[in-house]
Amino acid sequence: MLDTTAPLFFKSSGNFKKTSMKLLLSAQAKTIDQKTTDLYGIPGLLLMENAGLGVFHEMESYYGSLLGKRVLVVCGKGNNGGDGFVVARQLYLRKVKTRVLLLTAPSNLKGDALINFDIIKRIGVPIQVIVDGKNSKQELKSFFYAESPDILVDALLGTGVRFPLDSFLTEAIRNMTLISQVVAVDIPSGIDCDFMGGEEQKMVGPTAELTITFSAPKPANVCYPASNFSKIWKVVPIGVPKELIESSDNWLNYVTFDDVQENFKSFLRPVNVHKGHFGHLLVVAGSLGKTGAACLTAKAALSSGTGLITLGVPAPCLPIVASQSLEIMTESLKSTETGGLSLEAIKENQFGELLKKKTLVALGPGLGYEKDTVEFIQQFLKECPLPIVLDADGINAFQGNINLLEDRKNFLILTPHPGEFASLLDISIKHLLKNRIELARKFAMDHGLYLILKGHQTVLATPSGQIYLNSTGNPGMATAGSGDVLTGVISGMIAQWLSMPDSKQRTSIDPNDLEKIIASAVFIHGMAGDFAQNVKGDQALTASDLISFLVDVFLKLTN
């Protein structure tokens, strides 16, 4: 049997930024604004003033002088409309040709929005009011045809709107789409602020040349296809305290280059080191006909900086994989008659010796579906004392037996593509893609593991309920072996991080630190793909190219 002495887990002192860039859902944005007033005494009127002033300054920064341009500010009845009134005032007082179109009766305005509406009335900003009625659609059409502004400021709906929209607002938005230069306040009207990707759906909204969002970006600013409606987006601080934004209650994160570069500081090496300081990864992978997956995983880990790598494969595969890389050690494992991994490898205690002095295990790529192999994977997970990155056939081994994933002795990372995850959950791929973030988050929390759901804007879900959306990658990476490379990069970087000289051979891990390393590894894999795409395009890109371009990523991160 395997050595089952598992490491203990306590807090460690990680030198990391506490969050990646937070994405705020509409309810979260509303909550932090309210807490800013209730807990810190900052009035909503000041937040609205800062928002409108911020939009004006970003417009000036983007367009240059606005003098001589005709600007139409379209406002609704909520606080987004209030922000628009502030924008209109700032423009008008600076002699910019400004007009406001209010698409609700003034009697519907209240609170801070009403205060700012009264101000623009008193200073003389031209205001046109169109309300829902018998002839409103024709009024909208005639107004936009006659007005034809140089720039339209979209302050109609904002983040708190409920869908579906009524026909009046829908018609107003359709007319707004006719204007080529649109500046959106927080989010383009008609777009669901909380859209988090997945299944494509029909969206109607103006395509904003510039979107100015407040305090933090919103999911729709970055998640495709909603993100197509914001060509450029900028975040403007309006006075909300940083700790409210970065609270763990706000569980959606967007991983950027700056975050990864900060996290990568823990990988910078002092002079007096040797290979033992950077981890010893065990890769258990491959079967006859699928040795490429094993080799790609091991090579990717090697190029990610892992100090030592042992690649364990079924005995018939050994000559093939041993010829692929001079730097990787190989180990022959008990095999089935057809060249798959045999359960006998555990029964004969072959792994008891093999796991000694290893840091982490990457398990699954190319192992196949044989009954003996499936039983081996399940038993190995149960008995292995080390952290495991489980991929491909390693994940497939738990179809119909999801609860066995909880029978383990250390942290576990799963890296499924949508088909593997849908099979694991026994649901359709269509249903998964429509709800991928919610399903990934629930699965990670329910089973206490880290789940990396691959695809466009790969999702990392953590046991704590945090979600990290990746911002790198491209269609050229939809190629055989790309996932095996990802497993190698993740496994290699974690094994390295767990063994760095300043870690004192970590046996205590801050989960927040581990999240940052996993999210950074996913980002690095995608960035290697982006570098490769720039040279080779989409069609010619291969998984081996991702490994080749890792060097460019690491050089960029250290500059």
Image (cartoon, rainbow, N blue to C red):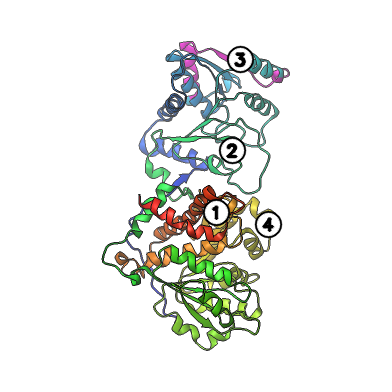
Q: CA distance from mark 2 to mark 4?
A: 24 Å
Span colored in magenta: 113-137
Within 10 Å of disc 3 (Cα), the crowding (few <14, some 14-19, many 20+) is few
Image point (46%, 35%), residue name? 234
**Residue on which disc 1 sits:** 458
Instruction: Please state the horizontal and vertical placement of residue 457, each as a whole percent of the image.
Output: 55, 50
**Crowd tier of the residue under label 4, counting other residues whose Cα lies within 10 Å: few below 14, some 14–19, many 20 or above:** some
In front here: 547 or 65? 547
Q: Which residue is mark 4?
A: 429
Up the image or down, 539 lies above or below 87; here it is below
Mark 4 secondary-structure assignment = helix
Does the magenta segment cover residue 365?
A: no
Counting residues from the N terminus, which is met first, the one under dot 3 or under dot 4?
3
201 shown above or below 379 = above
Q: CA distance from mark 3 to mark 4?
A: 47 Å
Task: Give the image location of residue 365, x and y in percent.
Answer: 57, 69
Name the secondary structure under disc 2.
helix
Please tell me whether mark 3 sits on a helix, a strand or a loop.
helix
Of mark 1 and mark 3, the one earlier in the sequence is 3
Using the image as rendered, state which of residue 528 and residue 199 is in the foreground. Answer: 528
Q: Nearer the viewer, mark 2 or mark 3?
A: 2
Cα–Cα span, label 2 and label 3: 26 Å
Please give the residue where the numbered disc 3 appears in the rendered image: 147
Residue 445 appears in the picture as rendered: no
- The image quadrant of residue 396 is bottom right
Residue 228, numbered circle: 2
Q: Amino acid at mark 2?
A: Asn
